[in-house]
Amino acid sequence: MPLPAWRPQGPEKLRVKRALAAICACCVILPGIAAAADDNTHPLLAFARERADKNDLQAKTLLGAPTAGEAEHALEQAHVPPDAECAGSIGAQRFADLHEQLATARSAAGDFAGAAAAYRRAHACRPRDAYLLSQLGDALFSARDFAGSRAAIDASLAIDPKLVSTNRTAGNLAFIAEHWADAIARFRYVSASDTSRRQAGYGQLMFWLSQARAGIAHPEFVARTPGEGWPQPLLLYMRGEYTEAELLIPIKEGDGDYDEELHNSTDERLCEALYYVGQAYWARGQPEVAREYFAALVNIKVIYFFEHGLALAELAKLRK
């Protein structure tokens, strides 16, 4: 699920969630784990390894995102006041938007520490904007500053406890920390409240997996009308209605029916599938197999999807 490059149609249009290590970590192939999962019985792994061999192994960038240079030039031209004076200035809204554009440009390039700095400056101009705090929490999560992310998310929830994007990141924090009751509650809310049925599907996946990882024998989805197309095959996989091999069909169709706004390329779908299927293996008591799926995901290098960052966080735990 991708990070939005901008939000011209409202903050809840597209949500993200990514939690990445420093960009240098994204440009290094993770070593394979000793044949815990072979390609014959794990078709997603085989396909991912094939894609990684053919790709140039450079981190991919979010299509349509502004460049940091463009955003920095716009800030220079605007003569933005110091942070302490920005909230009281006449152009506070515009200045915050310019800082936010720089933050999204830096995030798209993998500079999450730089993105967090820009979001802090945007927040200085609009201190009561819960969405900016939510985005700051995302950037800090991606920079692996989990304590900082938690503080930003708590501040966002204090302003608007119903903001879906903030609850999604709070759920990701709880999931990584294995605080299952909190994760289940957060993702239940996201699944039920996201106005986009397609985006709600990602909340449903995390809701299901939070229950499964907590040891609940029969996880369930929130009852609501499902979206169409991707990622519905992943939800069907969780319920046992799709095999792993059958997932390859809609994944491979991604490049053929790619929609830039929906971020549905083959590599993007594969990134998501590797994460959720890997988590399903972990829930079934096979963390060593999950580790191979997460490593394969990172090597696909879709760095702007929150699944990439969540996989990195899980790999860090598994290495311990």
Image (spheres, helix red, strand yellow):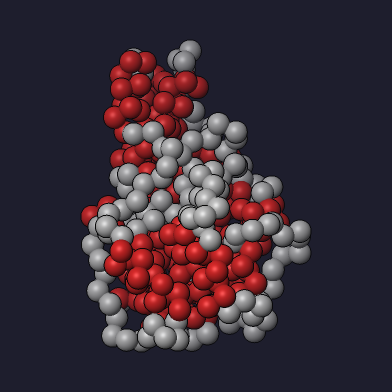
Residue 39 in which image quadrant:
bottom left
Would you say 15 lies left or right of 152 here?
Answer: right
Residue ID at (47%, 20%): 94
Q: Closest to the observer: 237 or 265?
A: 265
Can residue 83 be seen at all in this image of the molecule?
yes
Would you say 301 lies left or right of 191 here?
Answer: left
Residue ID at (31%, 33%): 68
Residue ID at (39%, 56%): 302
Question: Which quadrant does the C terminus fall into?
Answer: bottom left
Residue ID at (47%, 47%): 3
Q: Closest to the observer: 204 or 155?
A: 204
Residue 107 in the image: state x and y as whole percent.
37, 44
Q: Closest to the observer: 258 or 165?
A: 258
Q: Exactly how many numbered labels are in the figure?
A: 0
Residue positioned most to the front = 256
Can residue 103 be seen at all in this image of the molecule?
no
Residue 144 in the image: state x and y as whole percent.
34, 56
